[in-house]
Image (spheres, rainbow, N blue to C red):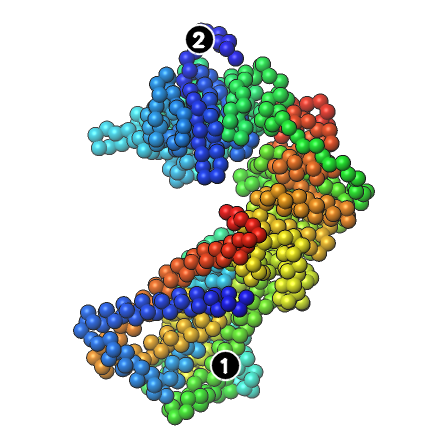
Amino acid sequence: MARVDVRRVLVTIAAPALALVLALAIASLALRASGHSPVDTARAMVTYARRGSTQVLILNTATYYYLAAVAVAIGFRMNLFNIGVDGQYRLAALLSAAVGGAVHLPRPLHLLLIVVVAVTVGGMWAAIAGLLKAYRGVSEVISTIMLNAISTAVIAYLLTPGRLAVSTQGSNNIGTRLIPVSGQVPGLDLIPGANRQVFGFIIVSALVGIGYAVLLNRTRFGFDLRATGRSQSAAVASGVNVKRMVVISMALSGACAGLVGLPQLLGASYSYALDFPTGIGFTGIAIALLGRNHPVGIALGALLWSFLDQSSQILDLEGVPKEIVTIMQGSTVLSVVVAYELVRRYSQVLEQKRVGLALGQTTGVTA
Amino acid sequence: MTSEPPGGPSPVAVRLTGITKRFPGVVANHDVNISVRAGSVHAVVGENGAGKSTLMKILYGMQRPDEGTITIDGEVVTLGTPAQAIAAGIGMVHQHFMLADNLSVLENVVLGSEPRKGLRLDFGAARARIDEISKAYGLGVRPDAMVEDLGVGERQRVEILKVLYRGARILILDEPTAVLVPQEVRDLFRAVHELPGRGFTVLFISHHLDEVLEIADEITVIRRGETVATVRPADVPAGQLAGLMVGSELPSPQTRESTVTDRVVLEATGLTVRDAEGRLLLDHVSLRIHSGEIVGIAGVEGNGQTQLVEAIMGMGPLAEGTLTLSGEDVTAWGTRRRRGAGVAFVPEDRNRHGLLLEAPVWENRVLGHQTQAPNRKGPWIDRAGARADTERIVREYDVRTPGIDVTAGSLSGGNQQKLIVGREMSGAPRLLLAAHPTRGVDVGAQAAIWDHIRDARAAGLAVLLVSSDLDELIGLSDSLQVMLRGRLVAEADPATVTPEQLGSAMTGATAAPGTASSPGAP
């Protein structure tokens, strides 16, 4: 059995490795075409990433990328495409920031309240798409995209002075009232010598990853969810209430999405302002694909993605357009999707052959 | 069979000679010979899978025969595409309609052969012709109605009109009544009756003998891809015709002791299922199965067996009816709760309903039994327990696999089936719903599965057995029920039933003496 697993692991790793090689090749071509040296560019990026403060930034970015990707992956495992993570986390961050800035509570309670608000808002916002799908047959792809637009409008409406926003002194930015210290998450000195701290929320991110793995692989609920994702008809026959499953897993995905804004909110900005980061939800989709919905794979994908994001900051100084990184990220996702499909088909055939071979002595292979 | 209809000899419109069509592994048609007289309604009957559809596809140019010739009005033709068939005057009304919902009847009819006046479309002329055809054959089609607003019967008449509009002289109606309610069937028959008198020839495909006897001038019976006989309805008793369709040999049931007890396990009363359009798929079926009893359901596939099994499993909404399990009303229970109460299920389509093909074998042991020992520990999946029990199933049911970590999809069909049967027989179920439990397994494994079912029956299991394998039905069942159009139409004793009796009941011919006719509750 051991040998089988080795082979399976190799096949599993082959796909992303191939995709990365392909993406590197495409990026190198793009660099050459624009008259830059791929080797020098790579060296500059790696050198920049060696700095402690860059490493902190990489970890910090990966912290929320990871949460976004897990949120997307929960949907994927159920064959649901939650494109709405973006709207879910922004709305959740705004409302939890507003609640967090409005109350004074002892630290654990204050933090807990913010987290609960964020998770609830994200979950309920996503559950709208789940309910529409389960009871009205609306494709969650469409409804979550629409809900993104709606949440942008709702945020614009709420984030005005007199509603949830106050103007920030000395700038024309506006945001929610600052969350007091009791609601903030202190940073961690993980990287020695860096002048920045890693988001304390990275611990929550890791816990979410573990929770995701345990929930899906070890619990009955997770079994039902994966079964529904693999074959809805077989799940129905096995007694899964698919409609309820759609609503629950969509809400769960949204709840996880609700956490996405918190590392930034509670670890750096302490207020939801006009310049709060957007678009993390879409990055999460790419990373979930890259990481194959696997908790460890997603972590590696998130780190890779944020390494590319952060280390590209140096490129402008080197005279290389940093958009080269966007090209690389895009081609990685594309080639990963293709490579996974190829590997999936290949391993299916391989396994059928292997089963046939193993039984060769006892029975003819029936088609 | 040689007598000519009154009014003089009528020439042969379509002659199929020695048609043979092979697919990898099967011969769909073998040396089929049919002569269809011009101006007649000629029915082709046979069980599902007998080769009717393949034959009609060949005639409509959708498939090429490997051997044989097609003669239309005395000329040998080669029909490579439906366009060539249409040019030869053949039109086909498919079982599944090919209409654009968001266009009007008029637009649908002219689609693909639009009448032009210069560069403009000439809808006026088309509308006049549609009205004319519609009146002439009593089709009652309104050219300006939107297709999406039409009922099934009306849509079918639009399809017929479309074929007539294109100038077809030979019409193929493929299972035209399968989608209709009785009133619509009468309307259709009225329209079809009009056609021969005006020089049209109709090929009517069906597996319902009563319909065929009512409408056809001649009937050709196909069994296992071969023409068995061509007869006139008046010359043959219905029972004999049914016998021709089903075949003449029935297995003799094994003598064995009855284990039927007087404890009722399943009692179904007036089970009724409708599809989205309100058509009856399951029509007030009442059924009682005792502990230790195997009730077999015979019938041509697609007559409500699937809906019956799924209704008992709780997989779809029930329009009417109640279900009790050992006296407890379970009508409102979901599938999971019913499974938990000891209902086991071997589905007819194992790929769709029985397995997660991409999941390992041991996870497939858990499927459907997530809430039961040994797969469960509180909210957790008991991996060790499930794996150990999967090893047991692999051993006891002789599932040929190199291990329990390979995906279920990599096993052969027969081994997948053994895995499912083994899984469903685990945990001492009270009631087993077995749809084609040995489909796709080899003879040895089939006997083993039958033994497992017999043993469980002796231990008190109640079984509902749906099968198209008469060996299986007669060999296992304590009593037989025949299903036709969503109803249980006849009851038979597997020890004494004859092919004619079974065939008549299965195809809707008049019940032969000896079968107690028992239409479902009103």
Q: Quadrant of residue B466?
A: top right
Q: Which residue is mark 1?
A: A203
Disc 2 to disc 1, C-alpha distance: 92 Å
Q: For mark 2, name the chain.
A: B
Left or right of B313? Residue A348 is left
- Check the image and name the residue furthest to the left: A35
Q: Identify the residue shown where x is 55% and y is 73%.
A: A211
- Check the image and name the residue furthest to the right: B262
Q: Position of residue B101 (x, y in %)?
A: 41, 39
Q: For mark 1, name the chain.
A: A
- Rate crowding at label 1 as few (under 14), some (14 to 19) or many (20 or more) other CA atoms within 10 Å: few
Query: Secondary structure under badge 1?
Result: helix
Q: Position of residue B122 (x, y in %)?
A: 28, 29
Q: Amino acid at mark 1?
A: Ile
Residue B9, disc: 2
Q: Nearer the viewer, residue B412 or A280?
A: B412
Left or right of A28? Residue A342 is right
Nearer mark to the viewer, of 2 and 1: 2
Q: Position of residue B508 (x, y in %)?
A: 61, 27
Q: Identify the residue shown where x is 73% and y is 24%.
A: B514
Q: Position of residue B114 (x, y in %)?
A: 30, 31
